[in-house]
Each structure stands twice: as structure tokens, then as C-alpha cells.
Image (cartoon, rainbow, N blue to C red):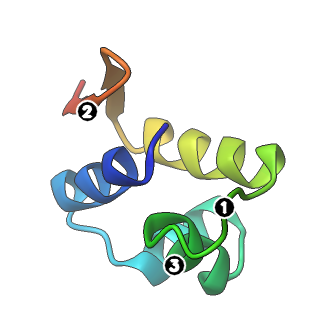
Amino acid sequence: MTPAQCRAARALLDWTQPRLADAAKLGLSTVVDFEKQRRHTISEDAKTAIRTAIEAAGIEFINHSGVRLK
């Protein structure tokens, strides 16, 4: 999952960054830093938590660059 895919998924879900952070059980700064690429990398656990929360809400990741609603 790329930062762009994360932003696109949030847009499809009409979620704010705080909503995603809550769903992923992460701090808001982790989501913000990932989406804005402020840190070169975030932990794999954090990335997995973000992806899991997004997928649980009905998003499917496609072609290593896109997202769509299931």
C-alpha cells in the first residue's frame, strides 16, 4: 500500500485521517506521517493496521497502485 492509495481509500470511504487512525488503533501522527511521507518508512505493523482497517471498511487494493470499493 502506498501513501497515495491510502489517501484514495480514505476519499472513497469519506474518512478523515483521525477516523482512519481510530479504525487502525494508531496515533493520528502515524497516519499523517505515512500519507505525507514525512518519515521514510513506518513500521510494517502500522502499515498492516492501516491496510486492515481500510479493507474491513470495504476497500480493495488493485494493481499495486489503485483502490476500489468492493
- Is residue 70 or residue 10 the one in the foreground? 10
Q: Earlier in the sequence, mark 3 or mark 2?
A: 3
| Residue at horizontal 55 percent and vertical 42 percent from the top | 51
- 27 displayed left or right of 33: right
Q: Secondary structure at mark 3?
A: helix
Q: Earlier in the sequence, mark 1 or mark 2?
A: 1
- Is residue 60 or residue 35 the one in the foreground? 35
Which-is-in-front pick, marks 1 and 2?
1
Mark 2 — residue?
Answer: 67
Question: What residue type is disc 1 on?
Answer: His
| Residue at horizontal 24 percent and vertical 52 percent from the top | 8
Mark 3 — residue?
Answer: 32
| Residue at horizontal 24 percent and vertical 24 percent from the top | 70
Q: Earlier in the sequence, mark 3 or mark 1?
A: 3
Question: What residue type is disc 3 on?
Answer: Val
Mark 1 — residue?
Answer: 40
The vertical placement of 48 against 62, above or below, is: below
Residue at mark 3 to residue at mark 2: CA–CA distance: 19 Å
Where is residue 52 shown, x and y percent of the image?
59, 40
